[in-house]
Amino acid sequence: MLISVSIGPFQNWDTQVEFAAASGVIRWGMPYVNYFSNLVNQPPLGFYVEALFFKVFGLSLSSGVILVTLFGLGCTVLVYKIGKDLYGKSTGLFAALLFALTPWQLILSRSFLIDVQCLFLSLLSLYVGIFAIRKDSVKLFIVSGTVFAAALLTKLFALFIIIPFLLLYSYYGPKNPRLVLSRLVAFCLPVLMFASVWYQTILGRGVLNMFVHSDLSNLNVNGFAPNYFFVGTFLLNFGLGYVLIIATAFSLAVTLFFRKHFSKILFFDLICLITILSIVGLNTVLGAGLNFRSPYTNAIKYDYQSLPFFCLVAASLAGKSLSLLTSTKSKTQPKKAFFISLALAGVVILLAATFANFYYANQLSKSDYLVLRVGMEAGTGYSFFNYTPIHGGSLQMNLQYLGFIIVISGLLYAIRNDLSRFFNKLLRPMHRWIETKNAPSSHNGPKSH
């Protein structure tokens, strides 16, 4: 919270439109923008939630940004919970840390946009869904489906959370076709009910209208040729940064190379990878393949649901490094050195990604204007204004530094037992090697006659 409130808020044309839609709910009871009957081109639920918040805390953009920031903190908690449940506590903690402090998350959690609210509901649906699958509970399937329906009525991007849910269900779910069908019906029924109420009953447009959006009708014009690597440009330079991308790639490579050793978490890594590739792939098809303007320039929003899965894979280096060190007991000396080197590399890369996030968070808080480019051409990106940049020595900057200190000290305290185990495993082979070198030789010279 300390780091978030020291940054932004960020504003652009979209934040003004969404603020007008939330204001329309208060004025007319519907998310109309600027005048009666001009319905916003998004699902409605997010604007009703914002309007309720405005009723309590006052109608202003600053109070709306506070609500978004609270949803961002909720997303951080859910990333921790999901990471802990799938991988372990240390992975959950590092995933939450990486997620909360990426420039991508910090910018959106300090902008009056419904994307963070949608992600919160999506992750909550997945979290409840994990328990529904493992406990085979119809009630929990209904709860998960209800939360997913709320996410879908907030923004269509919630559809992406279906990918990890279905993959987990195919792995852990019942094999009896009747049971499978009953669970899926329990999950889908709230979605159909919510969508029918809004799109069929209130708007009179039909349920399938939920998949119709103006973003998929506006093309890039004037002979503009989109670059197929626009998502990578955004991720490397603005969304994640080079170090976090390297951490994700290194973590996946370690799992795939030692897939027998990491057989228990290989499936979770593959789920994250498939989810990431599905989101990025669809955005690439829409933006570059079909030449739609908004999917191309707005990669920050179209790929946002992939961010937690990048962080989960990168953060799993914490547990993988400790596991590699633990397995050195049964290895020969060359293999021990190799495993120790991989474990140290994993820790170094993970720490580098963490401190890179600190650096970028500090830098973006000083900027009054951001252009998150997806290519080298002018205007190919998503821009924000920051009317309250901070500078060295200010109260906000000191709060930010205090936030960094609390984050690091809290993390070190939380994983103190894992740190102790890691250094014990790391130093033990070194001590043995030193003892072997210093041991007296068994050859005492020629026998005397």
Image (cartoon, rainbow, N blue to C red):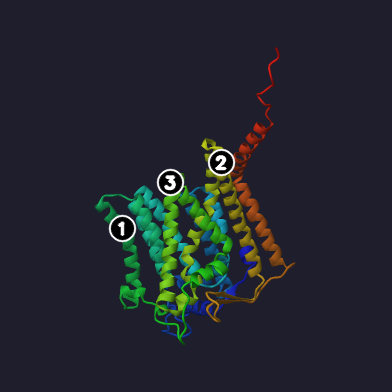
At label 2, the amino acid type is: Pro
Frontmost of labels 1 and 3 is 3
Helix, strand or loop at mark 3: helix
Helix, strand or loop at mark 2: helix
Frontmost of labels 1 and 2 is 2
- Mark carried by residue 152: none
Q: On the image, numbered disc 1 is attached to which residue?
A: 184
Above or below, 348 against 356 in this view is above
Q: Residue furthest right?
A: 393
Query: Front-most of 323 and 342?
Result: 342
Decide if residue 371 is in sight here: yes
Frontmost of labels 2 and 3 is 2
At label 3, the amino acid type is: Ser
Q: Quadrant of the N terminus?
A: bottom right
Q: On the image, numbered disc 3 is attached to which residue?
A: 263
The first of marks 2 and 3 along the sequence is 3
Query: Front-most of 169 and 314?
Result: 314
Mark 2 and mark 3: span between their CA atoms?
Answer: 23 Å
- Disc 1 packing (10 Å; few <14; some 14–19; many ≥20): some
Helix, strand or loop at mark 1: helix
Residue 437, position as x, y percentages in the image:
67, 33
Mark 1 and mark 3: span between their CA atoms?
Answer: 28 Å
Mark 1 and mark 2: span between their CA atoms?
Answer: 51 Å
- Mark carried by residue 334: 2
